[in-house]
Image (tube, coloured by chain):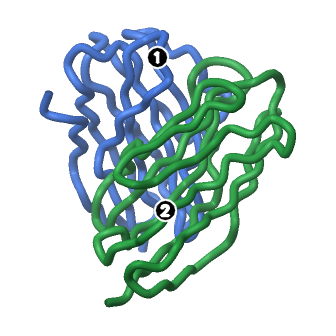
Chain colours: A blue, B green
């Protein structure tokens, strides 16, 4: 069990650029979640996958946000045409289906200049 | 929908002091309740959970009891240590699926 891994840990980008983050879940976990955390707030749910199926995406913040998990293992979160308001910590978590405990990665901190 | 309201911080305590962080919930039915902890520079870690009314979750000297009557899940520790300095989040599953709703977090600083 190597834990949930996120890459990169930090990303600085200019407004209008596209960014992509990667998450590698714990290997036997079939569920994968993305959250956003802004300063002084708790994590805010964005989307989740069961295997390769994206089962909930209505909470993605806008159509500039998209996520994939093409082979049911790692996942990517892409933000197109970034805005300063997208600056936040993006967290990934994974779990075994049917259990409620989610295991979190250390997050990717995005700064949009 | 399901939600939690968490005591605002920051909280500063001396080592060996008693800690209480309040959390109340609004929920359909009786979902499991959780406390997560986030140490500086790290991801969230599950601290403890309770799956039904009157259950007590405990870990690392922390405890929380699932109280249906008061819709509360307060976090307590009898004697805090400097190493307990972190941000604590109360959480519960949203109405569908396993995605969580997190409280705003309570920052705890323990001074020697």
At 51% from the left and 49% from the top, the residue drawn is B63
At 61% from the left and 31% from the top, the residue drawn is B55
- Image quadrant of residue A47? top right
Closest to the observer, B106 or A40 = B106
Q: Which residue is mark 2?
A: B77
Q: Secondary structure at mark 2?
A: strand
Q: Secondary structure at mark 1?
A: loop
- Image quadrant of residue A76? top left
Q: Which corner quadrant holds the C terminus of chain A?
A: bottom left
Q: Position of residue B72 (x, y in %)?
A: 75, 47
Q: Is residue A62 in sight in this rendering?
A: no
Relative to B30, A14 lies left or right:
left
Q: Position of residue B110 (x, y in %)?
A: 40, 81
Closest to the observer, B89 or A88 = B89
Report the chain holding disc 1.
A
Q: Which residue is mark 1?
A: A99
Relative to A32, B29 lies left or right:
right
Q: Position of residue A91 (x, y in %)?
A: 40, 46
Q: Position of residue B31 (x, y in %)?
A: 69, 25
């Amino acid at each position: 069990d190597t834990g949930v891994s996120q890459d990169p840990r930090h990303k600085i980008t200019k407004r209008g650029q596209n960014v992509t983050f990667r998450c590698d879940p714990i290997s036997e976990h079939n569920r994968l979640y993305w959250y956003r955390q802004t300063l002084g707030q708790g994590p805010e749910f964005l989307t989740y996958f069961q295997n390769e199926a994206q089962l909930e995406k209505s909470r993605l913040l806008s159509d500039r946000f998209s996520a994939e998990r093409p082979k049911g293992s790692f996942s990517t979160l892409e933000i197109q045409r970034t805005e300063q308001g997208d600056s936040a910590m993006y967290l990934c978590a994974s779990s075994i289906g049917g259990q409620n405990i989610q295991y979190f990665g250390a997050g990717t901190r995005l700064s949009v200049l | 929908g399901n939600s939690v309201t968490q005591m605002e911080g920051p909280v500063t305590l001396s080592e060996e002091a008693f800690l209480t962080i309040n959390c109340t919930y609004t929920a359909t039915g009786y979902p499991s309740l959780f406390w997560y902890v986030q140490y500086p520079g790290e991801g969230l870690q599950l601290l403890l959970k309770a799956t039904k009314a009157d259950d007590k979750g405990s870990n690392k000297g922390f405890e929380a009891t699932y109280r249906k009557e008061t819709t509360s899940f307060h976090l307590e520790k009898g004697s805090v240590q400097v190493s307990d300095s972190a941000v604590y989040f109360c959480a519960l599953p949203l109405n569908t699926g396993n995605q969580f709703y997190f409280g705003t977090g309570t920052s705890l600083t323990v001074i020697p």
